[in-house]
Amino acid sequence: MARLPEDVSAYAGRWVALVSGRVAGVGYTANEALRLARRNRPKARISLRYVEPAGGEALQLSSMLERIEPVLLQQEMPVYLVGGAVRDALLGELNYDLDFVVPEGAVGLAFRVADALGVPAYVLDRERDIGRVVLPDEGTMLDFARIRGADLVADLRDRDFTLNAMALPAGARSSASLIDPCGGQADLAARHLRLTHPAAIADDPVRALRAIRMALRFACQFIEETRQAVRAGADHLGQISPERLRDELVKLLQTGQPDQAVTEMADLGLLPVLLPEVAALAGVAQSPPHHEAVLPHTAQLLRWLVRLEAWLVDGRPVDDPAGAQAQALLAPYAGALAAHLDRPVDGGLTGRVLLRLGGLFHDVGKAQTQLIDPAGRIRFLGHEAVGAQLTGPRLKALHFSNEACDYVKKIVAGHMRPLLLANERVNLSRRATFRYFRRTGPAGLDICLVSLADHLATYGGVGDPDAWTRLLDVVAALLHAYFRQHETVVAPPPLLDGRDLVAQLSLKPGPEVGRLLRLLQEAQAAGEISTAEEALALARRNSSR
């Protein structure tokens, strides 16, 4: 943007229309200034500029603002950028999700912007006048909404937290233009999480969960009034739709500190309402080598899981001996694991969310299966199966997709398998590998990561180095089989099909055919047969006829 003449400072916070560097029109919108200039200088070439107040700092804002500015400048009404993009700009961070508010006609503006960009627009809420433009290839979303309340200040004061209640006029690029009626800039600098008004959480109880996410993301401390309001909001979470609760849970798990999210939800009384089965783990004791009760152990597993993702999947620098050993052994599979975890999942999720859900629920069956044997040792026989039975209904109650529910249940049901294989103290056979993935499918990959995090959470680190090495070797062998030997060990293409068996062995279609096909596939994966003739001979020997 060209430098403004010195004499426009009197118009700070407004638009000016310039002709040869001189002011020909002024207005609170670009269009207002343009109309006045055209009346005064109808044949002149006119340029429009927003006049920033003095003393501000340049803000880090998306280049998308410059692309859509010509459309915004044509509006008869003021347009304001609000919310997260303004907050992040003050932090020096780019935010590609841009929220705008206008006095009226927000849906129409969304469609005009979409036309200019050559993409579709969508009506999110006709009654509340909310429209959206999505540019998936650019990772950008533009939302346009009608101002709620009498004016912009009323709209901002009705939001959740002060750090989210700031605005910039369209065209502004400096912090001096900030509209901040609630003191959000000062709270952001002090890292205080403060409500815009005392009833903010009572008005929308889901904000109690959002408060935890905001505090974690921006390293904020709750002021006491906010903490009390979050606690009070727990009693009203049941009023919120399952979809909104689900979405907030997913966002909490997607933070870099899902362990802290679980701990805060427990401390503030939100966990019993959102995830009662997980909350029931509080105070459930465990015997050594566990050094914590089940709920803090679950939080620590999530902490280690995030670190393992960073080391083994994202290739980030390792700052821990356990991570160094794991990264050295499992580095060949980092790219394939990344593709696995980044895959889209029905319901707008990713594989990484399912992995963390699996970690969150992995021990959820322990509250119902705790037993103390005569020697005083605490056991949880069958807790993984009970946990899977508890996990499915809870995820369904939160309206997760069937795909997500079934997948997370598999992680929970199978999370002990790598440890059991490691405890056998023998090299992992092809048959054992095949059986592992026959039971778990692709979730077996997630189970590998959960098992590593489970060990580290149990010991508070490597603990028993021999046990850690054995577990790593099992995980490495399973990953190698899945990514390097998939068609020979994990899922070999069948040598015979059901019709072959029916014809060659004079069988009737039914369970016996299925049993023989499974037997043949396992023998093939184990390397015991490799031709159709060998498969037929084995089937003949094992047929019940």
Image (cartoon, helix red, strand yellow):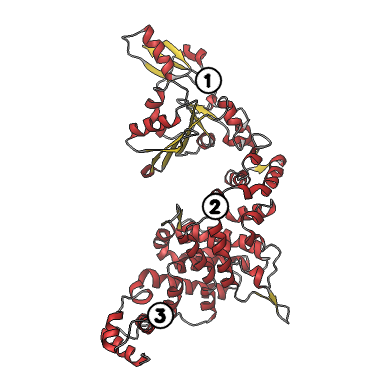
* Three-letter code for the amino acid on which mark 2 is drawn: Arg
Q: On the rendered image, what quadrant is the N terminus found in? A: top left
Which residue does the image show at 41% across and 30% down from the upper left? 108
Residue type marked 1 = Pro
Q: Name the residue under label 1.
A: 53
Q: Rate crowding at label 1 as few (under 14), some (14 to 19) or many (20 or more) other CA atoms within 10 Å.
A: some
515 sits to left or right of 386: left
Which one is earlier in the sequence, the residue at label 2 or at label 3? 2
Residue wearing tag 2 = 246
As drawn, is 45 to the left or to the right of 461?
Answer: left
Q: Nearer the viewer, mark 3 or mark 1?
A: 3
Q: Report the residue marked by disc 3.
A: 430
Q: Where is residue 494 in the image (x, y as percent from the top left)?
A: 31, 78
What's the residue at 45%, 25% (across, down)? 171
Q: Is mark 2 on a helix, strand or loop?
A: helix
Q: Nearer the viewer, mark 1 or mark 2?
A: 2
Pointer 2 local density, CA inside 10 Å: few below 14, some 14–19, many at least 20: some
* Mark 3 burial class by Cα count in 10 Å: few <14, some 14-19, many 20+: many
